[in-house]
Image: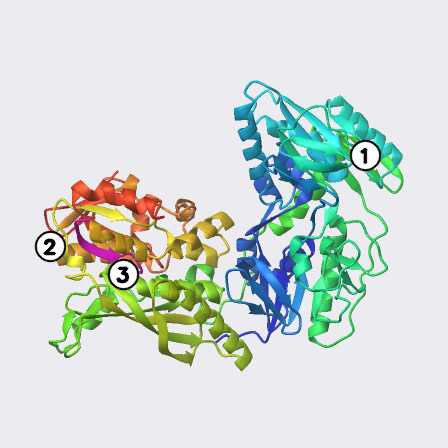
């Protein structure tokens, strides 16, 4: 039985310093401390490689750290959300769209954003700020394509504002990116800086080298002039002049300013708005809060905003977190006196500076690549650290039991156990175990029909607020499928052993997430039961009023009906991959979005269509639940493999041998298949994949199937589709290409 951790360390923002701490945590976590990472994005980017991505020297993923995978590998919790407020006294972070979380120690590493001091902005439609860097490429490409469509045949006019290292590298490397929209790379680039020369703070020789590189590229450079107004493609400089031409795209790469959130945190700041800290990186108020990287400003130690300082802070941060928790004196951070500067010129060369020397050449680019590539590779090793196997030999990743609905007992075990029981009949039961449907429908003496269901699962990942949302949606799905409206819920929760404070916080997060969804469906929490156990499980007994008559059951399919599926498959595979830190951020984002899409609106729209049988697709997979419908209806089905929708990443993980532990039992339950495609085809294997918060499988009159799919698309189920048809014959499933 694994107890809850005693302390909580929270990283707000995962910039260079916090990312390095996360990587170190994977190798050696602090005992009895839970690490939570809070980020606006599921990936973070390394700014040093952005120019190489622009110039085509690196693929975009080379500069990205996948927080979903790294947190999974490190055993850390990841929360992707927008923080709105910090309460230092209560040690709490508030969010825009979820319950607050507490901390014992907080490390803030939000980085910086380009400064707009003294600049007024009217129409910002052509403005592309260099940060947030996670979205910079998509915003830049979209803007260039949009303007290229308007200015067909003309040279694209780009203005880069900012003459520091970032702005210069973007300007020098931009032409290759322009080729994405114009194969000839036709663009005019203007670089504007408020300083009297390029690369302020560098050697004069380095600045001259940069100026010559810009001249060779035909880049127009305006020095000593600040932009004071932006309106569409028009810029106004501080002397009242304007560049000769109107810009199609304006890239904003000025000096560093604090992110807007910093002002809302209520911590002491310096004259520029950055959070003040002591040389231990702890805030000057003495609160258990550290501030690192660009976000912090050490009293009496003026430093430029550069990532090299942030990386060097990470070991001090980790040491001081441990010391603070142990109530020991903190260690001082002593910044290095200088650092190697290397600017990518986008042509296989680089310009550099080190200890009074200025240099350039292809060898300098090779040096930059030799530094950056291995540096990033350290953060892109997502394999979990090896753990010793227990005595029973079940400690390998392959032996890990799946959670969510993938943790259900196999259908064979369930059906055989029920068959051995003598369950008494009751005049009050309209739909019960004899029909084995999604929910029971009972009529209390003298009452109206009441729909009842129960569903619970082991938490599929370590975010209790989101798990609570999914548990409510998963339980309600059975009520929606049978044509009822939920109105009351009773919770069932197993909490791991831990302190009362930790158990209270965990239960609060679970139920707060659940209540968010219960409110949306018009239901409320009326009771429940909690116990301690070896792992977190959560679920609900739901009561609903039966609004559709007769109830929509599984056993009413008709020969000729079209089979419509409302959501893509693959949740079990992706959750199994996530347990192995193999589920990429983009895949995980799509997975959670699908799981958090309620089946309520889909079920409600069915009243307007000639629907026969209906079920929700959950733990027994599409194949197992379709088999139940066919057995109850005495019919067969013909599926089209190419029409079966899969979540992103499912095919790749299946090809890599990843599968849910429940998949073999589901394949057995699905029964023999008449296959026109290989059994190993990912769309066939997905039939056996257990779904947590899966979609609805609907039998509908063929003449109305296309209209139903169109209606589902209109209300948000964009991947709903016809996957097959019901046919005469003995119970069975035929899968064609």
Task: Give SS at disc 2.
Answer: loop
**Mark 3 Cα-neighbour bin, 10 Å: few <14, some 14–19, many ≥20:** many
Q: Which residues are magenta?
A: 609-620
Q: Is residue 406 within the magenta segment?
A: no
Give the numbered dot on residue 634. Answer: 2
Quarter occupied by residue 302: bottom right
Between 574 and 440, the residue placed more toward the observer is 440
Q: Quadrant of the C terminus?
A: top left
Q: Are marks 2 and 3 in contact (CB under 8 Å)?
A: no
**Which mark is first along the chain, 3 or 2?**
3
| Tag 3 residue | 480
In this image, 357 relative to 713: left or right?
A: right
Residue for point 59% across, 60% down: 84
Quarter occupied by residue 319: bottom right
Task: Give SS at disc 1.
Answer: loop
In this image, 426 relative to 369: left or right?
A: left
Q: Work out whether residue 183 can be spotted.
A: yes
| Tag 1 residue | 198
Give the numbered dot on residue 502. Answer: none
Residue for point 18% across, 59% down: 552
Q: Work out whether residue 162 can be spotted.
A: no
> Gap in Å between the C-alphas at discs 1 and 2?
78 Å
Residue for point 76% across, 75% down: 328
Between 664 and 292, the residue placed more toward the observer is 292
Q: Is residue 617 within the magenta segment?
A: yes
């Amino acid at each position: 039985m694994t107890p809850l951790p005693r302390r909580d360390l929270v990283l707000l923002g995962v910039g260079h310093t916090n990312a390095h701490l996360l990587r170190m945590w994977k190798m050696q976590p602090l005992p009895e401390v839970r690490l939570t990472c809070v980020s606006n994005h599921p990936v973070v980017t390394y700014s040093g490689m952005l120019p190489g991505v622009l110039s085509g020297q690196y693929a975009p993923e080379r500069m990205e750290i996948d927080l979903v995978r790294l947190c999974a590998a490190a055993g850390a919790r990841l929360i992707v959300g927008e923080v709105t407020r910090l309460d230092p006294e209560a040690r709490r972070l508030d969010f825009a769209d979820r319950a607050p979380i507490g901390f014992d120690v907080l490390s803030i590493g939000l980085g910086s954003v380009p400064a707009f001091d003294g600049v007024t902005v009217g129409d910002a439609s052509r403005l592309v700020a260099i940060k947030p860097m996670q979205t910079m490429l998509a915003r830049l490409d979209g803007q260039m394509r949009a303007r290229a469509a308007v200015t067909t045949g003309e040279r694209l006019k780009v203005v880069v504002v900012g003459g520091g290292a970032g702005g210069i590298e973007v300007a020098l490397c931009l032409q290759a990116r322009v080729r994405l929209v114009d194969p000839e790379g036709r663009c005019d680039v203007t670089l504007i800086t408020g300083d009297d020369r390029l690369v302020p703070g560098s050697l004069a020789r380095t600045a001259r080298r940069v100026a010559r590189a810009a001249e060779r590229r035909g880049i127009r450079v305006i020095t000593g002039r600040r932009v004071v107004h932006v309106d569409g493609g028009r810029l106004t400089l501080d002397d009242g002049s304007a560049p000769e031409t109107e810009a199609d795209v304006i890239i904003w790469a000025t000096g560093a300013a604090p992110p807007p959130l910093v002002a809302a945190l209520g911590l002491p700041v310096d004259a520029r708005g950055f959070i003040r800290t002591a040389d231990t990186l702890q805030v000057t108020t003495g609160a258990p809060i550290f501030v690192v990287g660009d976000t912090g400003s050490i009293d009496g130690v003026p430093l430029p905003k550069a990532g090299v300082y942030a990386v060097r802070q990470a070991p001090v941060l980790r040491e001081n977190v441990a010391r603070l928790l142990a109530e020991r004196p903190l260690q001082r951070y002593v910044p290095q006196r200088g650092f190697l500067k290397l600017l990518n010129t986008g042509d296989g060369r680089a310009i550099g500076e080190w200890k009074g020397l200025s240099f350039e050449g292809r060898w300098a680019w090779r040096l930059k690549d030799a530094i950056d590539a291995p540096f990033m590779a350290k953060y892109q090793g997502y394999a979990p650290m090896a753990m010793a196997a227990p005595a029973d030999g079940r400690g390998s990743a392959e032996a890990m039991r799946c959670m969510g609905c993938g943790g259900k007992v196999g259908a064979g075990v369930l059906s055989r156990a029920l068959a051995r029981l003598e369950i008494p009949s009751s005049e009050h039961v309209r739909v019960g175990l004899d029909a084995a449907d999604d929910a029971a429908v009972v009529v209390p003496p003298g009452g109206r029909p009441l729909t009842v269901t129960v569903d619970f699962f082991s938490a599929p990942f370590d975010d209790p607020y989101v798990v609570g949302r999914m548990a409510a949606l998963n339980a309600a799905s059975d009520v929606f499928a049978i044509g009822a409206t939920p109105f009351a819920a009773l919770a069932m929760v197993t909490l791991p052993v831990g302190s009362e404070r930790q158990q209270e916080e965990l239960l609060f997060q679970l139920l707060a997430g659940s209540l968010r969804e219960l409110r949306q469906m018009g239901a409320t929490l009326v009771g429940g039961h909690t116990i301690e156990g070896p792992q977190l499980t959560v679920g609900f007994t739901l009561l609903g009023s039966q609004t559709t008559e007769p109830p929509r059951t599984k056993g009413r399919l008709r020969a000729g009906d079209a089979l419509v599926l409302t959501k893509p498959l693959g949740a079990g595979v992706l959750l199994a991959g996530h347990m192995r830190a193999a589920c990429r951020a983009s895949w995980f984002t799509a997975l959670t979005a699908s799981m958090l899409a309620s089946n309520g609106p889909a079920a409600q729209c069915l009243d307007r269509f000639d629907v026969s049988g209906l079920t929700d697709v959950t733990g027994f997979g599409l194949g197992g639940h379709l088999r139940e419908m066919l057995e109850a209806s005495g019919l067969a089905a013909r599926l089209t493999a190419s029409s079966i929708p899969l979540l992103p990443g499912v095919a790749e993980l299946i090809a890599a041998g990843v599968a849910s532990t429940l998949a073999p039992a589901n394949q057995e339950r699905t029964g023999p298949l008449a296959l026109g495609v290989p059994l190993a085809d990912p769309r066939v294997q997905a039939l056996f994949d257990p779904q947590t918060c899966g979609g609805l499988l609907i039998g509908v009159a063929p003449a109305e199937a296309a209209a139903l799919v169109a209606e589902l698309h209109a209300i948000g189920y964009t991947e709903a589709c016809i996957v097959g048809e019901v046919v005469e014959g003995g119970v069975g499933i035929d899968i064609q290409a």
